[in-house]
Amino acid sequence: MNKAKLSYYFNLHTQGLVNSYSQLFLADSYWLASLVILASFINVYVGLFGLLSVVLTNFFANILNYNHHYIQKGYYGFNSLLVGLFIGYTYAPSWQLLIFSAFTSFLCFVLTIVIAGLQANKKLPFLSLPFLFTVWLIILATPHFTSLIDSDSSIFIYNDLMKLGGSDMVNAYHFYNNIELPQIIDVYLKSLGAIIFQYNIVAGVLIVIGLLIFSRIAFMLSVVGFLSGYYFFILLQGNIGLISYTYIGFNFILAAIAIGGYFLLSNLYSFLLVIVAAPIISMIIAASATILGSFGLPVLSLPFNLMVIMVLYFLYNRVKADKLKLTQVQLFSPEKNLYRYLNEKARYNDEVYLKIGLPFYGEWYISQGQNGNITHKNEYQYAWDFVIKDDELKTFRLPGTNLEDYYCYSLPVLAPADGYVVDIIDGIDDNLIGDVNLQQNWGNTIIIKHAEFLYSKISHIKKESFKVAINDYVYKGQVLASNGSSGRSPEPHVHFQLQSTAVLAATTIKYPLSNYIIKEGNKYVYYSNGIPKENDIVANATINSLLKSAFYLIPGKKLNWDLKLENGKSELVKWEVFTDINNYSYLYCYNTKSTAWFCIDSHQFYFTSFEGNKNSLLYSFYINAHKILFSYYQDMVISDSLPIYDVFKPMNRLANDFILPFKNLLKAEYRLTYFSIDDYMYTRNIVLQSNINLKSTFMVNKHLTGTITLVDAKIQQFESTINGVKFKAICEVL
């Protein structure tokens, strides 16, 4: 095996080991895992058998050719870890126990694969069910194996501590573990330790610290869930010994984290669900103790598993998910999950599956908007009338008495989106200026079906100007006919509406238009989706070929940067474009091993997420080129929202994390200004300027800027800052 393979497998198994400990708390935190590992070794034999089980399980998974990604993430290892910890706590160490532990690790791995497969068919997690079944099998089987002797774990702890640190360590452990705390705090901390079969305060404190470092929301959920379940027992005068002496109150903690911040996005309603769920877990604990006790089996994590699976199955069968939202993309952190959701809601909340454009070329004026004051009322309110006006706000050239005097007369009418022509009304003459045809209200009209229950209708078209026929398939932007003034039309204009049926007189529906520009004075504002209003001057966003070519980053394209920092340092930085197994595109930086994922559609380039070194050129480009529209309008501003988790440092997020489920006080605003262009027709040079504003109640607001220069359809230069140091980078695109 060569050096590269050895390095790969070493990293694979190291990460798989660490993540197995982290997965106990549905996390992928290095710091949490480190503290859990440390806590598991308070009783050294418990820690060693847990460690051995993870190593063996990941080894089995590797040699049997199971998914390396799952090994790395700890999916295969965490149940075996629990089994190993149980064995190390329950039985006295011996060479026979080592052999037994190896076989039980394999058994747990097999059960993990089987149960995970069965649960996946129902879209449900396997959680710690493999651990439960393995441990119950062990307990039922071990009376027949006389070499397996029960352990007195408390004696082993003191012996281990004496070997490690002498009497001072024993005394320190004895002191901290016997601090008199209020019962509820004592039970909470020992319940946390009980998750890894360490029934002591020291283990609980280490895990609490790990939880706080990993996630403030997870910590709050652990407290809320535990308090709810604990006080329910007290309120009903239940057998508090079930929680106080066996410390299976960890079921409240794990279920609260899973329900309140892992499988669901954290908010007020998820916290309320945790408060409601914990008492039900109390009942499951009591019932399980009665049933399993008759077989001599412990309850362990059964209530946690049952509660989470029931809640998820219950929520999957809803018609509408508005209060309790399931996590769609799992980032293994309640904060990351919620910050991502808030960012995507801000960026894409108005996105629609099918994008409808304006049905004309150039800039037009909305003479009557939705719910207008003439004909757009009641069931016909969601429609627009468009005309063209000159600088004096007139719709015609003098004298304005003929149809041909009107700027919009006879101009092309375009398909607003792909679809089938389902109806055409033709043969109706245009009116004289000022006249209307009330008998044939809509005039010459075309209706296009774009999707089920989504049709567009364009009316008042010029007689015999249609270039398409019924049943033709038309493409977005295709010329359909010429604008006229037929039907109820005192002067030439385009009537445009969306409706749910193909009926000529169908009522209108509210549906946004996409990728359009509004002219406000001398400035242009881009809207990815929206409802333009009466008196707006609107236009389809036309594509600038230089912009589109410069940001057309396809797999295999390489960008080499000559980076020069203001402090005199310089570096050659190499990027390359790749796609992952899910066909998502990303830029990879060889220098910093950082990755920035992005998307390209017909109108724009935009980044979606970043992973890696945030003191890198790639990260600076990620935030400064976060969204690029392939259209150029002088001084046009593109606004977007940056991912809070990517741009705010951990310490600046700390206070916000505690209130995030209820209120977000952090904002990361992105603005891109189209600064200069050398020529609209034959463009060779474009300069874009970005502005990043980080706003917070907990810190001084920050302002960052950047400049991107495009030359001859390529990214030529990028200027901004890296960790507060200004730089200039010249790009060579290969």
Image: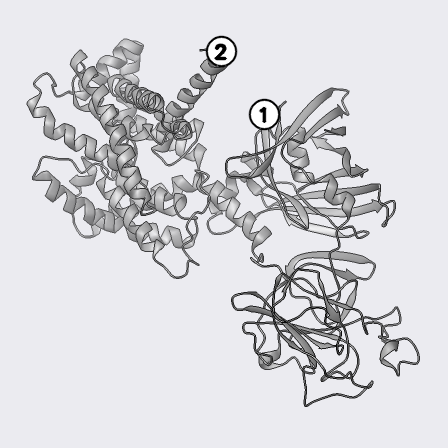
- The image quarter containing residue 79 is top left
Residue hosting label 1: 593
Secondary structure, mark 1, is: loop
Residue hosting label 2: 3
Assess disc 2: are there few (<14), some (14-19) or many (≥20) residues with their C-alpha within 10 Å of its C-alpha. Answer: few
Q: How many marks?
A: 2
Q: Is residue 380 left or right of residue 305?
A: right
Observer-nearest of 59 and 49? 59
Residue 330 badge:
none
Which residue sits furthest right?
A: 398
> Does residue 66 sit above or below 645 in this rendering?
above
Asked if the residue at tag 1 contacts the one at tag 2, i.e. Cβ–Cβ closer than 8 Å, the answer is: no
Q: Which mark sits nearer the N-terminus, 2 or 1?
A: 2
Residue type pointed to by label 1 = Lys
Quarter containing the C terminus: top right
Instruction: Give the image location of residue 574, x and y in percent.
Output: 67, 25
Instruction: Give the image location of residue 350, x and y in percent.
Output: 58, 58
Instruction: Give the image location of residue 303, x and y in percent.
Output: 23, 43
The residue located at (80%, 57%) in the rendering is: 523
Observer-nearest of 607 and 26? 607
